[in-house]
Image (spheres, rainbow, N blue to C red):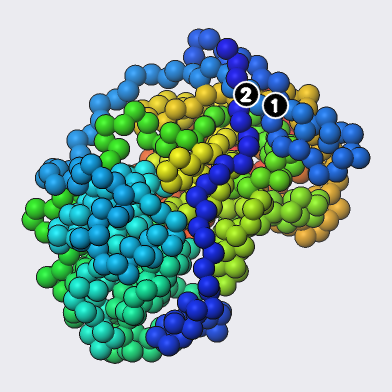
Amino acid sequence: MKRKLKTAESPGVKKPKKDEADNDDMEEERGLTVTEEDADQGTDKPAQPLEGAEAGEEEEEDDEEDEEGSEDEVEKGEGEKFGDDDDEEDGPELPTGLTGAFEDTSFASLASLVSENTLKGVKEMGFDHMTEIQHKSIRPLLEGRDILAAAKTGSGKTLAFLIPSIELIYKLKFMPRNGTGVVILSPTRELAMQTYGVMKELMTHHVHTFGLIMGGSNRTAEAQRLANGVNILVATPGRLLDHLQNTAGFMYKNLQCLIIDEADRILEVGFEEELKQIIKLLPKRRQTMLFSATQTRKVEDLARISLKKEPLYVGVDDNKDNATVDGLEQGYVVCPSEKRFMLLFTFLKKNRKKKLMVFFSSCMSVKFHYELLNYIDLPVMAIHGKQKQTKRTTTFFQFCNADSGILLCTDVAARGLDIPEVDWIVQYDPPDDPKEYIHRVGRTARGINGVGHALLILRPEELGFLRFLKQAKVPLSEFEFSWAKISDIQGQLEKLIEKNYYLHKSAQEAYKSYVRAYDSHSLKAIYSVNTLNLPMVALSFGFKVPPYVDLNVHSKGGLKMTKRGGGGGFGYQKGKGAHKAKIFKHVNKGKGDKRQFSR
């Protein structure tokens, strides 16, 4: 039975506006305001066909073609079933008692444990009741317990660790002369800024100092603020280690609590060694909190070296049927390489009055599609790892504050960020693994009663990825578009790329980075670069003939390509066993000859 996929904007959780001027004055008095001057600037049963993509209403009523498109709908086919669930890995062997299973989930029930100033800040932010992770972790943390917490993205982890950390500083009566009492580590600059913003709202009625240090900001100004005394410090790992080792005035010997947010992500993006050094430098007598969306072996190893002997394990999703939140409606569409851009263009054009995030596998691909879509009058924003920090920051807050808009991004924006009221998550390039998928779609349907939609675009050769998603408890159904209603702009795209020098160069770099990123996928059985029909891939970038691509083809014992820390794009290393291959321009040699690579 078919049913339509709703595309109405999700209500989200709105925060009341605050008097920013008052907050800024308070920050200036504490000497902690971060200004721009500080910055350096398969199933047997086929899926049911769908009539089209509900794509919202067009802005130009006089455009007949647009009016027809606005009536399109996406209907939901029956989801495919792939394989059997594998046995789940055993979780970390940690005590599971004292998980805060109390009946009253209102923040008011914490009145005897949490200061009036903190509760007043929570109320002004618009929160009345705790989420499950907050309900289970805040009380034990207030008692001083170490904790390893695992919860889905959008579950409210930030307040779960901010409230106890603020209370710790409040009860110990920390002053600037006491230095830093709490350190909060974030994997990316954007998440660090967001955590700092939430803390700023919570600290409205407190007098303690707090600050933010991160890569891309003015290091000298940061060092001065640290010397003045920052009671609660939000930081990225690299910049924190730098100040610990090189800033003489940094007062951290009174540290009472270390919080590692998105611990799995910090380890994934290459900060493992920095974390170990940070843990060695910080005082041993402290409370430690590890918060993560997924539990991995590396997270467990980090827990062993950073937590006390008997930490508390809080896993709010351990017995849940799905790894994603209930309000998220998710599906995939099967699309051949040559039609990928036409599908994306049609979907974005129809939904431009909504709020969407589109994920790409490389920085250059984001850059090209940003330039192309804006050139053809489809306004979009972009965030990727090659931008200057000031640009990333400006774009991030611009998209957060917008009621509608399209943000193109790499995975730099996929972890931990709370962007209000995102209606659609579109994964134009597929994720590397189920964990990455979960974190991408975690940008929508956030908070209590949050709703949202997610669309995964797969090539026919990539359908095996659905089996891995099912094993990870991710429920997906197939969406099919009416290809007759997809905008056929291929000819116009090719002419534009051919005639516009700058778009041509950008398209070349994007095409190359797409192929290289594809070759770096860890699931080689699913994402094999040898399955790419390069002439068809090139069409989606506007090329009639594929450009040259230098590609490191690795032997079985070669070095795996890895993502750069925090950038969201791909960096490449060549192992000793690696040898170069060049992808040549396609030459028609007959139907049986499909060779595209030459060593």
Give left or right: position of 224 versus 412: left
Residue at 37% over, 31% down = 322
Residue 207 falls in image quadrant: bottom left
Q: Is residue 138 above or below residue 490?
A: below
Residue at 32% over, 79% down = 208
Name the residue nearer the viewer: 402 or 567: 402
Classify 10 Å Cα crowding around label 2: few (below 14), some (14-19), many (20 and above).
Answer: some
Q: Amino acid at mark 2?
A: Lys
Percent x, y of residue 456: 56, 35
- Residue under pointer 1: 73
Percent x, y of residue 267: 32, 56
- Residue under pointer 2: 4
Residue 259 falls in image quadrant: bottom left
Residue at 34% over, 75% down = 206
The residue furthest top is: 45
For marks 1 and 2, the one nearer the N-term is 2
Residue at 63% over, 47% down = 355
